[in-house]
Amino acid sequence: MEKPAYFFILLTILSLSSTTVCSHFNKTTDQESLIAFKSSIISDPSEILTKNWSSNASVCSWMGVSCSLNHQRVTALNFSDFRFEGTIPPAIGNLTFLTSLDLSYNNFAGFIPRELSNLSRLQVLNFNFNSLTGEIPHGIFNLSSIEEVHLTANNLQGRLPKDMCNGISRLSGIYLLENLLSGQILFDIYKCIELVDLSMESNHFNGSLPSSIGWLNKLQRLYVGLNNFQGGVPSSLQNLSRLRELSMRGTSLTGEIPSFIFNMSSLELIDFANNSLSGSLPFYHNLPNLEQLPLYFNMLTGEIPKSFGNLMMLNFLYLKHNNFTELYLSFNKLNGVIPSSVNNASSLTILAMGPNSFSGSVPNLGNLRLLQYLYLGLNDLTGEYPNKELGFLSSLKNCRNLQNIVLSDNPLNGLLPASIGNLFDSLWSFEASGCGIKGSIPVEVGNLTNLTDLYLDSNELRGFIPWTMGKLKGLATIYLGYNKLQGLIPVALCLLSKLGELSLSHNSLQGPIPECFSELKCIQKLYLDSNELEFNNFKIILELDLSFNSFSGDVSGDIDKAVSLGYLSLAHNKFQGSIPPSIGNLKSLEFLDLSFNSFLGFIPDSLEGLTYLKHFNVSYNKLEGKIPTRGIFMNFTAESFLKNDGLCGETCLKVPHCGKDVNVVSLMKYNVPSCVLVLVVLVLILVPMRRRKRTKQLPNDEISLLSPWRGISYMELARTTIEVLRVVRHRNLVKVISCCYNQDFKVLVLHAEYGAHGIASTSCDIYNFGIMLLEICTRKRPTDERFGDEISLKSWVSFSLQENRISEVVDTNLLGREDQNFSAKEQSTSPSERISISEVVSKLERIKNMFLANNIY
């Protein structure tokens, strides 16, 4: 009896020792596996490993690690959103007690280790939103305890494992969305008999959908959209009596929507959008639980069933807890009228029915009090009565949540009602382009205080642009082009500090462009072409189209202040002078059209530096000289330079070849006349002066003004002339006067009477300086055809000023706010009656002080 007792005690001791050793060995294995995992991490932005994973502490105390209470074995790893970067080591497969492994929302790369198939206790595997590559290892779906496999949003490739669900499967959820998986969905998918969720959207699966999916009688959610399937909807799906959500969008499906789909009372979501399905809409009002039915981007035809209004609780939620109700029928071929019963679907928040071929009038929608978005564009809808007010817009005043109305490209052919101003503050976008809308824009539009986008272009609107638009402080986009609007551009638009795009093209607008436009800091696109407007400068802008207007004069050299300009069109105007070299400073310019004007001189070499310029056109001008050949000019063709008789260059540009002395000719043309003029002036000044010096002494006042009595140098003449031209270029008459006074003009333009009579007096000089100023201010010469024996340039200006008709004589390019009160003094015609230089100085001083005192300078 003793021996068996001793034997039993010995066995017990050995058993306990073995258990202790094995337990110690397994704990060590878990620790070594986690240390291997830690070593595979190359980036830890939150410093979790350094601050929480101490080698002196038990792994069960490490952040993200869970252990069993009895044996202290690792049972779960949850490192979701730790922002780890690295690879998954094969040593993870040694954590044999692991039931949950969550590495989602990190940046793990590389392959999924095959050793994970050793985790016989694993129930949940979640690798969502990483950068894993390669194929899905065999055995992952065959783990005896596995219930959910989440591999969404990685870069996994290849085909599905052939042995999916070969064992006794507990797998209820397979989530493979947004990968690069290919091949066919295996027929053996039916072996995953416990499947509730099957999500395979956004991959490269092809072939046809296997009919065996219809044998998964526990399936509730089936997402197979955005793949490359062929054929139609499998008829076996009618066996899925528990199916609640079905998405097959964007899968190239063909044929008609099977009628059994609309007899599946369990369905809450049906998404067949963006396929090639055809046929007409069935009577689907027997689906009591239907919440979503996106059918857009198909080839559906026919009319909407009249019973549509029975779907009062139709809910198109993508996030159900928001409780939105949405109907999408866009991008099909539906026709007929919009049934009035749509007004009964009182839960609708989105009604999208275009583009289609709906006709007839828009029904009253006032009962859709929750409506937020109304999309009816691109149909054949009309107004209730031709050329009458669009009454359905008035009914929308009950829709307090309405944010967006899209009616564009329908032949409404009606008037905008004044009641449009009764739409609520919630409205931020109104689009009715190309609708044949007539009449005027109601001033009540100014009541839509939260409006940000207004599209009324391509209609038949007349009258003025209402000034009340200036009250819409949030307005960022205004498109009123291609109408028949008249009058001035209201200055009130300058109050729209958020205005980024303004299109007034192809109207009959007149007058100046408001100067305050240059102060709109958000303006990026400005289209004013095809009107009768006058030009100003704009600094902060991306696109500027002023083509087909009546602009004239020179283009300001300050154009380069619009540093962000990418599109500039001044085509079909009457611009003169030279092309400003400063355009070469617009480094972002991609489009430049200066065609059909009267530009003179050369094409500036500075334009060669416009590296982004893709379109360039200076055709039909009066340009001359050599066409630049460097930079972007190597890419332009003859179409860019047509009808400029003075241009020369390469033969491929269809212009004459430039001779070797083309530059010499240009210098002779532009510089020699200036030099000849200077010589003539010098001769006419110096010869009479020297002749008078020999005969008699000059009066003391004239000696003091022109002393020392000597010949005037070319440099003095050049400096003075350049200063005058510089000031004139800035368009400020008062500055011209002030400049002339400060320079104490010693060099003056001479009258022809000098050559006739040899008279040289400062009075004559002052008279002719006045004539020169008149030429600058009026842009007319004394030799113009309108002047002769009966009326001269001076008498014409004098008479106009006496009659307070300054705008008729002053060049419009010079006349601005600072010049509106400018008046001229009387001048006599006889040299003996003309005032002396000393009087001129004092008078100019008084004029300058007067302008300064009135804040006009």
Image (cartoon, helix red, strand yellow):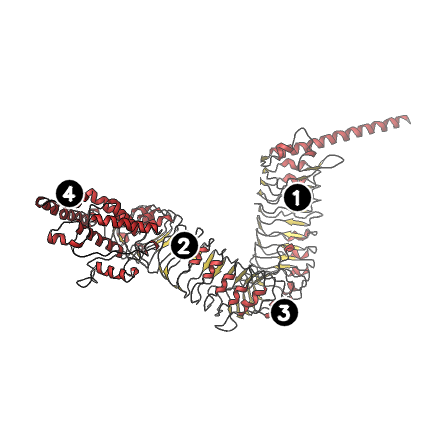
**What is the quadrant of residue 716 in the picture?**
top left
**Are dots 3 and 1 in contact, CB under 8 Å?**
no
Q: Residue 515 in the image: x percent, y percent? A: 38, 55
Q: Nearer the viewer, mark 3 or mark 1?
A: 3
Q: Position of residue 9 (x, y in %)?
A: 85, 27
Disc 3, SS:
helix
Q: Between tags 4 and 1, which lies in front?
A: 4
Sequence-wise first label, 2 or 4: 2
In the rendered view, tell whether residue 506 sits above or below residue 724: below
Given this view, does label 2 or label 1 mark the residue nearer the observer?
A: 2
The quarter of the picture where the N terminus appears is top right
Q: Which mark is residue 517?
A: 2
Residue under numbered circle 4: 711
Of all residues, the one furthest to the bottom in this rendering is 385
- Asked if the residue at tag 4 contacts the one at tag 2, i.e. Cβ–Cβ closer than 8 Å, the answer is no
Q: Secondary structure at mark 2?
A: helix
In the picture of the structure, the residue carrying the numbered disc 1 is 125
Whether residue 250 is situated above or below residue 675 in the rendered picture? below
Q: Any mark on residue 307, and which?
A: 3
Image depth: mark 3 or mark 4 in front: 4
- In the picture, measured across the screen, residue 803 lies left or right of residue 253, that is left
Camera-nearest residue between 839 and 789: 839
Q: Nearer the viewer, residue 485 or 234?
A: 485
At label 4, the amino acid type is Gly
Q: CA distance from mark 3 to mark 1?
A: 47 Å
On the image, the x and y values in percent for residue 800 come to 26, 61
Amino acid type, mark 3: Ser
In this rendering, does residue 110 appear at all?
A: no
